[in-house]
Amino acid sequence: MAHQQAYRAAVDGKHPVNKTGRLAETFAYSRRLASAAAVFLAASTALGHADPGLFTGLAGQWSGRGTVTLEDGSRERLRCRATYTVPGASMLMVLTCASDSYKFDLRADVVSAGSNISGKWSETSRNVGGDLSGRGGGGSFQVVAIAAGVKANINLRTTGNKQSIAIRSEGFFRGADISLSK
């Protein structure tokens, strides 16, 4: 009987009705769909972790040395350490540098929107602070920090575990050049 149904279905151009075969096809389709979804989820997760934010390469503890040029033109050697906390598209930076007679404690709390950076900064040892804005990308950042009586241009460049920071100011010091490593 089953043979006759298969023959009639073949003549009519239809496949015979086979509940077991249809169930197996449904399970096979479901497995392929689940596999495709798993691959898509894994790929999108990997892409999401590849570049979660502009500040990703900065996260962690850094230390190094540099020089500061004071208002009178004298230069002093610095010892510096920096901590960058990077939750996604925002960053909290604490940069502390000291010489035998000079110290500064620069803090910045910034966010990125594309390559634009904005936020607040403070220099706690002199109780001054204000707004910070600029641009960044590819491990390089150029920002301007502004407050009453203070304007500083800050260039930061990171390559792997090396970082250089150049600060030029019209305020409490003329500038600093700092090299850090992780």
Image: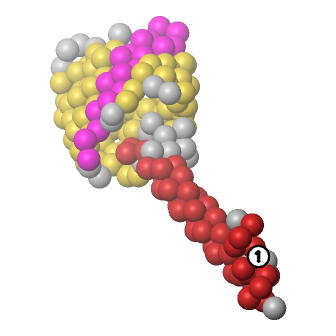
x then y, percent, for residue 126: 47, 25
Identify the residue at horizontal 45%, vertical 25% (top origin).
115
Q: Is residue 171 above or below residue 13?
A: above
Identify the residue at horizontal 33%, vertical 49% (top origin).
62
Q: Which of the colour schemes (rainbow, by chain, secondary structure, one colour) is used? A: secondary structure
Query: Which residue is tagged 1?
Result: 8
Q: Nearer the viewer, residue 71 or 169?
A: 169
Quarter holding residue 103: top left
Identify the residue at horizontal 49%, vertical 40% (top origin).
53
Identify the residue at horizontal 47%, vertical 8% (top origin).
149
Q: Is residue 46 above or below residue 12?
A: above
Q: Is residue 12 magenta?
A: no
* Magenta stretch, overall SS: strand
Q: Amino acid at mark 1?
A: Arg
Q: Indicate the quadrant containing the N terminus: top left, top right, bottom left or bottom right.
A: bottom right
160 with respect to 51 (left or right): left
Give the magenta part as a residue range.
Answer: 140-160
Q: Nearer the viewer, residue 139 or 100?
A: 139
Q: Is residue 99 above or below residue 11?
A: above
Q: Residues within 10 Å of mark 1 (few under 14, many from 20)?
A: few
154 with respect to 74 (left or right): right
The answer to whether one can see residue 122 in this image is no
Q: Secondary structure at mark 1?
A: helix
